[in-house]
Image (tube, rainbow, N blue to C red):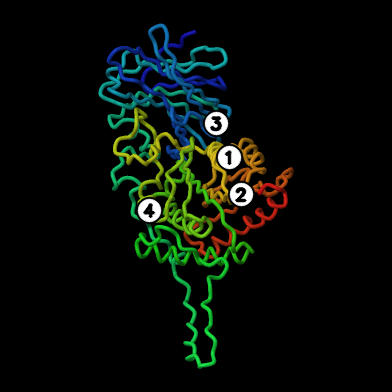
Amino acid sequence: MTASPMSKGSNRPVEARVVSVELAWAAGPGVPDVDASALLLTAAGRVRDDGDFVFYNQPRHASDAVTHIGKRSGAGETTDTVRVDLGAVEAAVERIVLCASADGGTFGQVPGLLLRVLDAGSGNELARFDMAAGTETAFIGGELYRRQGAWKFRAVGQGYASGLAGLATDFGISVDDTVSPAATPSASPVVPASPATTTPPVSPVPPPPPAPPTASAAPVPAAGPQPGAPRLTKGEERLPVDMRKRLSLRKEQVAVSLRKHGAAEVTARVILVLDASGSMSFLYSKGVVADVVERMAAVAAQLDDDGEMQAWTFASNPARLPDLRLGELPDWLRLHVRVGEVGLFRRGRKKGLDPSQVDMRDVGIQNEEQKVIAEVRAFVRDHPASAPTLVLFFSDGGVYRDKDIERELREAVEEPVFWQFVGLGKSNYGVLERFDTLPGRRVDNVGFFAVDDISTVPDAELYDRLLSEFPQWITAAGRAGIL
């Protein structure tokens, strides 16, 4: 069944619960490649965060309401399909904008371009819109929208010469399709920590000099380092003076926290995991994440015998970053503390990247914590160490893969790894927040706490909270034969 063609601006009701929106065209020599996508908008006409953008590099919305199915070719026609479960669309979403982008040309070079809406159950065509275009490289074909409790489809046919990046930006998506130092969070100068985290404690009054020894006085041996004293780390001397001073104060504070929790002599491999989902972009651009990394470098410098950290970033997919060596900290922050490079034009490696950098378009913008947890677990299994592993995992929430995450962390109970999760101000931490109360584990291998603004938390408080459960786990894991 074929629906009657719609004119630009017209609308009609959509009575099916689940619909398939097909973008169709006649592919052939010289015809650009075309990709379909969808934007979920609130009443304000904006996305809530970058997770509301569904496309080939982020094919499923967290609500499961919108899914990018992909392309099919046959009978002289190519289609790219987005599936929408209208009954599952969240109440905050008022419109679903149905978009397209052309790679390697303009839509004026795409013959037979049309958008059709099908009942996903019966296959009946509910709406059909034949589109004409010129020099545009991005296009809004139509939109599904709510009206008085029911859904309708409107034929839009609006083009963008600025491409999908321009279109997405208009609706609130954080897009960085350049790598110039002025444009990317990765190239931002390191933001100094807030006064609460960098003000040095008042130095104690030095003791008076010892009295000159008498002839009968025995020589007093020099005092050795106290247990848990700050450790000197290779490469530390190469850091800028201000960073070196902050590191020294922070290592002292880490040592104090370890002594407080009875773990002065503990050593550990430290692994850092950084959320790079779309909602984190503000924390990256403001330098908050860079400051977090610098503060965690002090933990690795004090706990790890070589002062290095392995590191991962993740969103829709995980990616291992180069190891963080203390002497390279400024460059590491500049090159690898990055987010927001949405993979709009995923055609080979992004130009201008340093060879050591991850192409963040491959990482995506959605939350898939279970994938990076699995990858870190595999690394620990493949690279056994004499010391236990402490994972410092930072996220701003949006957790929705609860069952998958719980399965990974339950299986990890028998591994020599403690997972310390830190929430950075947002909400919906899901199973991470509840894990302490979940039964059926021989030892509690997970810690969690959240802060509204980590930049206002003094170092002493932050390190105390980070390191409070780790020593308890070491004791319990030792008794259980895990260590």
Give residue 415's position: percent from left, percent from top: 64, 43
Marks 1 and 2 in Cβ contact (< 8 Å): no
Q: Which residue is mark 4?
A: 328
Comes first in the chain, label 1 or label 2 = 1
- Residue at the location (55% across, 33% down)? 63
The relative height of residue 283 versus residue 45 in the rendered view (above or below) is below
**Residue found 44% across the figure and 47% down from its top:** 323
Which residue is label 3 attached to? 89
Q: Earlier in the sequence, mark 4 or mark 1?
A: 4
Which amino acid type is shown beneath numbered disc 1?
Arg
Q: For mark 2, what is the residue?
A: 418
Q: Which residue is mark 1?
A: 381
Closest to the camera, between mark 1 and mark 2, is 1
Could you give the CA–CA distance between mark 3 and mark 2, rounded to whole angstroms? 37 Å
Q: Where does the image place residue 121, in percent across and percent down from the top left?
A: 57, 15
Label 1's element?
A: helix
Mark 3: amino acid? Val
Disc 2: CA contacts within 10 A as few (<14), some (14-19) or many (>=20): many
* Secondary structure of residue under mark 2: strand
Q: Amino acid at mark 4?
A: Glu
Disc 3 crowd, CA 10 A, few/some/many (<14, 14-19, 20+) = some
| Mark positioned earlier in the residue sequence (3 or 2) | 3
